[in-house]
Image (cartoon, grey):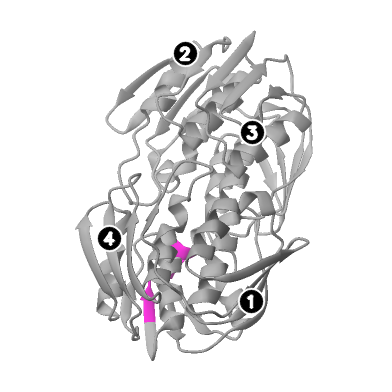
Amino acid sequence: MAKYIVTGGRQLSGRIRVAGNKNAVLPAMAACLLTSETCVLENVPKISDVVVMAELLKKSGVKVTGIGSSSLRINAKGIHSTDYPQVLTQKLRASILLLSPVLSRLGKIKMGYPGGDIIGRRPLDVHIQVFKALGAKISESNDTFEAVCKKFKGSKIFLEEASVTATENAIMAAVLASGETVIKRAASEPHVVDLCQFLIKMGAKISGVGTNVLTIKGVNKLHQASYHIRPDHIEVGTFAILAAVTRSKIEIAPVIQEDLDMIMLTLFKFGVDMKIKGNNLFVNCTKLKSVEKVVTDIWPGFPTDLMPPMIVLATQAEGVTILHDWMYESRMFFVDKLLSMGAKVEIADPHRVMVYGPTKLRGQALDTPDIRAGIALVIAALAAGGQSVIEKAQLIERGYENIVERLTNLGAAIKKVS
């Protein structure tokens, strides 16, 4: 267990580096199982979720070197195990991404139900739809999945919902399937694009990348490849909100402008002063004004992972803002901690809150419920007067690399106590 001790009320300044995309590296690690040759992933974020995924890969006989660094070498030539215990899979929602590559290589898999953050129910119905469409047989008992498939067969699939991980599983199953697969209503987030581009470097034939219709022609074999994971646009948005809330001037880099369209549009509406030069985003201190409504949506809409920091931003904006996340029924429940800090927030229902601002936040003893709410509480603590203690800080480090060090370099008064 770990906790952060934060003294707020300081303006920050300087340059903060953006880590590799958390949601891109995990499917890329799973995709390495689709070949017996060694793959190299660069710009890997140093986060605990990567360590857990590496443990899962090693459990099945895969060689993983470079854990804890920004470069991973993965060789799945010796993959042999098809049994993944729940003690590991429950630590990571992305463990579900092992289904496609293990079935492609070994023809069967048994795994515990995937876990991750407790922010709401995330059923696996769409995954089951994908695998059945491609010829697999899946059974469930208690908290365990079992699936068998001699060879995936290409198919036309219209996804029940634009699930990111279901889209990624469908892509990984289709690249080695016989025939052609067309995936309609596919998720098109930047991390899905990263997975497609990595697989194309490995020899996959994928068209429609970045759209919601993917056409994949199966190949007999994939080969080794090296791939640089793109910077995390969620981190970029998080640090931009941090700058706005603490009235600071921060340079954020590197960024990919096309990944930030909706994020920047929303922040502009709040009055945040931003500009991009090259691959650098500059955010200046500014007076914030409320926005009538912020609603999460599938890509390229406003991302659900930024909703908790956005709620903190709304507490410092003049007026009333409604914030609505229809995706997860428990996303909003962390606001009770903001209430204890002096924020004025009304919970309309599990998906909507009304925030009245601006309010002066005060330091408080806090408890981290999940990754995204955790970083939102860090932002709130840095904006608040006095000292805050944030418990269960290890949850934040599942998704944010060396966050204490990076914030300290901006002048933040934050330290970690184990």
Whether residue 391 is in magenta: the answer is yes
Mark 4, other Cα within 10 Å: few <14 / some 14–19 / many ≥20: many
Q: Do tag 1 and tag 3 residues touch (Cβ < 8 Å)?
A: no
Residue 282 position, x and y percent, is: 67, 71
Residue 189 position, x and y percent, is: 57, 41
Residue hosting label 1: 250
Residue hosting label 4: 353
Check the image and report above or below for 98 versus 302.
above
Tell me which residue sits at (27%, 81%) in the image. Answer: 342
Sequence order check: which comes first, mark 1 or mark 3? 3
Where is residue 144, by image quadrant?
A: top left
Residue 95 position, x and y percent, is: 48, 39
Residue hosting label 3: 31
**Alpha carbon distance from label 4 to label 3:** 38 Å
Quadrant of the drawing holding the N terminus: bottom left
**Alpha carbon distance from label 3 to label 2:** 20 Å
Check the image and report above or below for 101 versus 394.
above
Tell me which residue sits at (46%, 64%) in the image. Answer: 396
Question: Element at badge 1?
Answer: strand
Sequence order check: which comes first, mark 3 or mark 2? 3
Q: Amino acid at mark 2?
A: Ala
Question: Element at badge 2?
Answer: helix
Q: Closest to the observer: 209 or 282?
A: 282
Q: Amino acid at mark 1?
A: Ile
Mark 1, other Cα within 10 Å: few <14 / some 14–19 / many ≥20: many
Mark 3, mark 2: which one is toward the viewer?
Answer: 2
Q: Closest to the observer: 134 or 259?
A: 259
**Highlighted magenta segment, given as a residue range:** 389-396
Q: Do tag 3 and tag 2 residues touch (Cβ < 8 Å)?
A: no
Residue 181 position, x and y percent, is: 59, 14
**Alpha carbon distance from label 1 to label 3:** 35 Å
